[in-house]
């Protein structure tokens, strides 16, 4: 369902083309459609709706629970398309923090087994065309025991192998250890046979240099300072990159992530900042269209 954009999308330094938030969660018991509407009203055109685990209520205990909660995410995506008219791509998978929590309750063997089955189920649904990407999968973003860390990495390698066999892209939830994190992920990709350009590091910093990304696509968390970071590294970047909020739709954590209007707002700020760097209309348009359309196509489709 691709829209036909007008030929000129940059009008007086205001962007009128596609604007995509590549990592957003919605919760049908919280703001849900009103959050999607707020994004749309601000100029947003598409979202990647990432499956949200129910940390606060009850986590899936078996594969049939996973089937139910995945289906719930698909249903929400349909609602947003239908009611708000956004282009919604679904990202399905078991969250690495779920695995860690469950390892504490059901034991690491059983938790890993369930996690891998949940990856298999998500890949099945992706192959059926219900979703577009596996995620967010990865490893805990906080310190865990050495043993748990090793298990997490073995499991991630297995997940990447599975994604590679079914030719699916992945969105990765990982720790923040500077440039070492992507370097690590890149070598896991190589080991698993997963093309680096299909492994998106989510919640990335705005440092777009090759040293920081190791050639992986990244979605930059567009908080304060992100525009400055992007501008100072954009001309050194060799990666495909995009923008995200990681909006959680959780009223108890309002400040934890960015609000629904952030990506439209930052996109326009980026246009202005690039202008100040001396870029002409053409160059700015090409860049923003890469971010919100072309690189998305080449990474996920
Ligand atoms: Zn997320």
Image (tube, grey):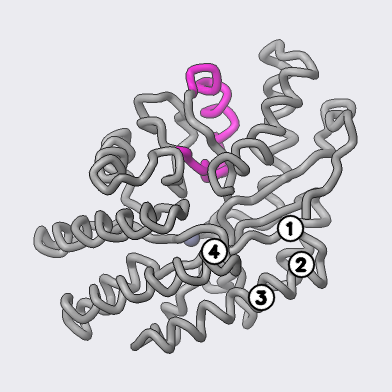
Measure how far apart labels 4 and 1 are at the Cα level.
14 Å
Viewer-nearest of discs 4 and 1: 1
In the image, residue 285 lies at what x, y percent? 76, 26
Q: State the residue at coordinates (71%, 73%).
A: 78
The magenta stretch is: 217-237
Instruction: Kindly state the secondary structure of the residue where label 1 is placed.
Output: strand
Q: Quadrant of residue 235?
A: top right
Q: Is mark 2 within 8 Å of ligand 1?
A: no
Mark 1 and mark 2 in contact? Answer it, CB < 8 Å: yes
In the image, residue 191 lies at what x, y percent? 23, 44
Q: Give the class, few, some or many, for how many residues have Cα within 10 Å of label 2's Cα (few <14, many ≥20).
A: some
**Does 286 sit left or right of 98 as displayed?**
right
Query: Sequence order check: which comes first, mark 2 or mark 4?
Result: 4
Query: Sequence order check: which comes first, mark 2 or mark 3?
Result: 3
Q: Quadrant of residue 216?
A: top left
Vertical comparison of 59 with 227: above or below: below
Residue tagged by mark 1?
A: 87
Residue tagged by mark 2?
A: 81
Would you say residue 254 is visible in this rendering? Answer: no
């Amino acid at each position: 369902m691709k829209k036909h954009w007008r030929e000129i999308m940059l009008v007086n330094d205001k962007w009128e083309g596609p604007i995509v938030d590549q990592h957003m969660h919605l919760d049908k018991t919280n703001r849900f459609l009103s959050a999607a509407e707020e994004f749309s009203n601000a100029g947003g055109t598409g979202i990647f709706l990432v499956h949200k685990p129910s940390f606060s209520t009850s986590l899936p205990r078996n594969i049939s629970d996973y089937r139910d909660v995945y289906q719930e995410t698909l249903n929400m995506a349909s609602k947003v398309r239908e009611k708000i008219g956004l282009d919604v791509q679904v990202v399905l998978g078991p969250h690495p923090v779920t695995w860690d929590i469950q390892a504490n309750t059901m034991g690491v063997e059983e938790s890993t087994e369930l996690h891998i089955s949940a990856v298999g189920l998500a890949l099945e649904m992706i192959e059926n065309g219900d979703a577009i990407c596996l995620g967010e999968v990865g490893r805990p973003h906080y310190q865990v025991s050495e043993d748990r860390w090793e298990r997490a990495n073995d499991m991630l390698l297995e997940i990447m192998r599975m994604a590679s066999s079914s030719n699916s892209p992945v969105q990765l939830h990982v720790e923040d250890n500077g440039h070492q994190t992507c370097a690590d992920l890149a070598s896991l990709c190589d080991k698993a046979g997963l093309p680096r350009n299909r492994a998106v590091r989510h919640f990335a910093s705005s440092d777009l240099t090759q040293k920081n990304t190791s050639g992986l696509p990244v979605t930059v968390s567009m908080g304060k300072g992100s525009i400055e970071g992007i501008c100072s590294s954009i001309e050194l970047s060799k990666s495909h990159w995009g923008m995200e909020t990681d909006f959680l739709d959780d009223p108890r954590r309002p400040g934890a992530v960015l609000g629904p209007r952030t990506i439209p707002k930052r996109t326009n700020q980026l246009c202005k900042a690039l202008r100040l760097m001396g870029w002409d209309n053409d160059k700015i348009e090409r860049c923003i269209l890469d971010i919100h359309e072309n690189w998305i196509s080449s990474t996920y489709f």
